[in-house]
Image (cartoon, rainbow, N blue to C red):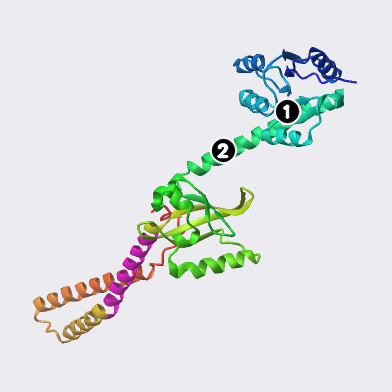
Amino acid sequence: MKKDDKGYHILIVEDNFGDFVLIEEYLLDYILNPTLIHARSFQEAKLILEESKNTFDVVFLDLSLPDLSGEKLIVDTLEIANGMPVLALTGFSDLDFSLKSLALGVSDYLLKDELTPIILYKSIIYAIERNRHFDELQKSEKRYSELFHLSPLPMWVYDLETLAFLDVNQAAIQHYGFDRQDFLSKTLEHIRPSEDLPLLHNALKAYREGNSLYPKRVFRHVKKSGEIIKVEIESSAILFNQREAKLVLVNDITEKVQYIETIETQNRTFKEISWIQSHVVRAPLARLMGLVSLLESEAIESNPELNELLAHIKNSSIELDDIIRDISKKSESISPLDENDPRIANN
């Protein structure tokens, strides 16, 4: 049988030397060259674990040591083990205490009388793998927490059943004006104008019936000050503390909307001016041009000064007519603004 040649570092906290030797023999059946450190008491194990250079893949802990035992021993050892997997060893079969030990955080609960080389080896491998997965999960949760709480945009998590806020980040607290505890005591209904609540309830009802819940839409929200803002939200379903929830990212587009409304108001004004120019101003201009043409037909050839004056008036009228036509043409090309246009997206 090929032995595991990984360089395992194992601490065995056991006051009975015979049991230590037995564990050592069992380990050597499956592991090629394990590094084994033996501690005979809790205090000795504590000194070893508190040495910064000492890290172990697993710690075997006899639950009946001369200076400490039972639950207190487990709690204190887990504290100084600093995340290393601890496997409890005992000579007594106690189902209730074994369950309690696992609940306290030990990776496994092993009866000495039932130990075999394969059981011991599997227990080590399982403990190491379980600890690695737990460490990755903690790192993942830490990354999520950093992305969530350090986001410059307001974010929150709410319960899909009760609509209660389950978590909010600092950006949301600052933007909406509620402190954290105040925020977490509220529901989505508290930040929506009362006249918009039917829209909220209808959307949630549709979602529970299997329809999508606005992955990205614009809503009105209310700050603590009473100010109503327009926001664009993006949301995704998550499981938060075993509860069906939604993670929401909020983008306040109030200024952007106001900017668009201002531009559209200006566009309407330009079109009104264009209409006035093309219908109101051009009417008397057309009459003026008609009068000039009439005067030209009746002008006295012997009066060159009059003819020259009529020519200037006619040319100026034509020039003014061209200007009015050009303004009208440009005004007609004005179209409503698209809120998603990248040219205005950051306004």
Point out residue 278 in the picture as x, y percentages from the top left corner. 29, 77
Residue 312 located left or right of residue 170: left
Q: Secondary structure at mark 2?
A: helix
Instruction: Name the dominant secondary structure of the magenta segment.
Output: helix
Residue 19 vs residue 218, the one in the foreground: 19
Point out residue 195 in the picture as x, y percentages from the top left corner. 44, 70
Task: Say if 228 sits above or below 86 in the image.
Answer: below
Give the quarter of the figure containing the N terminus.
Answer: top right
In the image, the segment drawn in magenta is 257-279
Q: Quadrant of residue 105?
A: top right
Point out residue 141 in the picture as x, y percentages from the top left corner. 59, 39
Residue 172 vs residue 251, the one in the foreground: 172
Residue named by callout 1: 128
Magenta region includes residue 321: no
Task: Say if 328 sits above or below 78 in the image.
Answer: below
Q: CA distance from mark 1 to mark 2?
A: 22 Å
Residue plotted at (77% across, 20% down):
6
Give the residue type that dot 1 points to. Answer: Ile
Q: Secondary structure at mark 1?
A: helix
Local crowd size for mark 2, using a 10 Å CA cut-off: few (<14), some (14–19), many (≥20): few
Residue 55 located left or right of residue 344: right
Task: Say if 237 sits above or below 300 in the image.
Answer: above
Give the residue type that dot 2 points to. Answer: Arg
Q: Are marks 1 and 2 in contact (CB under 8 Å)?
A: no
Point out residue 197 in the picture as x, y percentages from the top left corner. 48, 67
Tag of residue 143: 2
Residue 316 vs residue 38, the one in the foreground: 38
Residue plotted at (40% across, 48% down):
174
